[in-house]
Image (spheres, grey):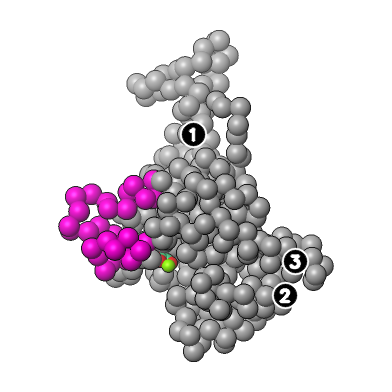
Amino acid sequence: MSHTLYPLRKARLQRSELAVPASNPSMIDKAAEGPADYVFLDLEDAIAPSEKVQARKNTIQALNDIDWAAKGKTVSVRINGLDTHYMYRDVVDVMEQAGNRVHTLLVPKVGVTGDLYMVEAMVNQIEQAKGFTTRVGLEALIETALGMANVEAIAQFGGRLEALHFGVADFSASMRARTTNIGGLNPMYPGDQWHAAIARMVTACRAYGLRPIDGPFGDFSDPEGYKDGARRAAALGCEGKWAIHPSQVALANEVFSPPEAEVTKARRIIEALRAAEAQGKGAAQLDGRMIDAASEKMANNVLVVADAIAARG
Ligand code: GLV
Ligand code: MG
């Protein structure tokens, strides 16, 4: 093990993250009562320019009126991109009027670390000026060629950054990939065309202590396709996936919750290694397979998620 270690900066259960257009208060109310671990109130791409101001007002109201934490949820706000004139007002209004109620800001289309520096500087000043004792977290969407080209540097930003998300729709556009699908498999490509990109982002996250989250899957009438995509992301190390429709929340919760058999196996691995250790051995056999200290780390990863789910109730 290297002497340099970056522990996880912030643990949060994030199996399912429901995207909710903040222009629609009834959808916000429903999201608060639903089973998502995370909800993000969207001020960005799901909101037409003519609705931006009202969506911001709805967001502030929903943050102040609803006790999201009491409902077992993390609540996030996706602000507009730094290339728009909406962004500064999103940060100023949301943070000044509800900065002690929102858990994280999701910054879209991050291309360079300076994008996060700007948001961080603004929220530092606002929290200080308002005397908030809370500290909002930052999450970054990696969804442009520039963001992916800089993902290792972005992951090292530090500050309040705690998670990176893979935004497959904008990434497809930015890469000029031959598809108009949002996520899912492409008949033109043998395998998953996004494998390398997601794996790169997950590696950057795990190297620098961030949570990797997989983004949207557009076809909400294809639950099996959604689950396949979620399984591929989970296999690579993602902790959760977006739901762009409420029906996708249960699918994400299912895929990103270790099944009972996996949890039992993890406990048995640890028991077998403890027994081997008592006999002065580092490795052991379980069900005809060799296991060792690395197996214990893998098993612990499963148990950490299982414990977080149990704690949520
Ligand atoms: C999400 O914002 C995406 O572009 O996929
Ligand atoms: Mg996007």
- In what element is the residue under mark 1? helix
- What residue is disc 1 on? 299
How far apart in space, not on screen, are marks 1 and 2 (Cα)?
Answer: 43 Å
User: Image quadrant of ligand 1?
Assistant: bottom left
Amino acid type for the residue under numbered disc 1: Ala
Q: Is residue 139 left or right of residue 190?
A: right
**Where residue 242 sits: x, y (%)?**
44, 62
Q: Residue at x 66, y 52 (%)?
A: 159
Residue 125 is labelled as 3
Amino acid type for the residue under numbered disc 2: Glu
Q: Is residue 296 visible?
A: yes
Of label 1 and label 3, which has the lower sequence position? 3
Q: Residue at x 59, y 50 (%)?
A: 157
**Where residue 229 sits: x, y (%)?**
33, 55
Residue 189 in the magenta stretch? The answer is yes
| Marks 1, 2: nearer the viewer | 2
Residue 192 in the magenta stretch? The answer is yes
Amino acid type for the residue under numbered disc 3: Gln
In this rendering, is residue 106 above or below 310? below
Q: Is residue 258 visible?
A: no
Identify which residue, 5 or 75, lies in the foreground: 5
How far apart in space, not on screen, are marks 2 and 3 (Cα)?
Answer: 10 Å
Which part of the image, by quadrant, shows the C terminus? bottom right
- What residue is disc 2 on? 96
Of label 2 and label 3, which has the lower sequence position? 2
Q: Dividing the picture into quarters, in which one does residue 138 lie? A: bottom right
In this rendering, is residue 294 above or below 17? above
- In what element is the residue under mark 3? helix
Of label 1 and label 2, which has the lower sequence position? 2
Magenta range is 171-199
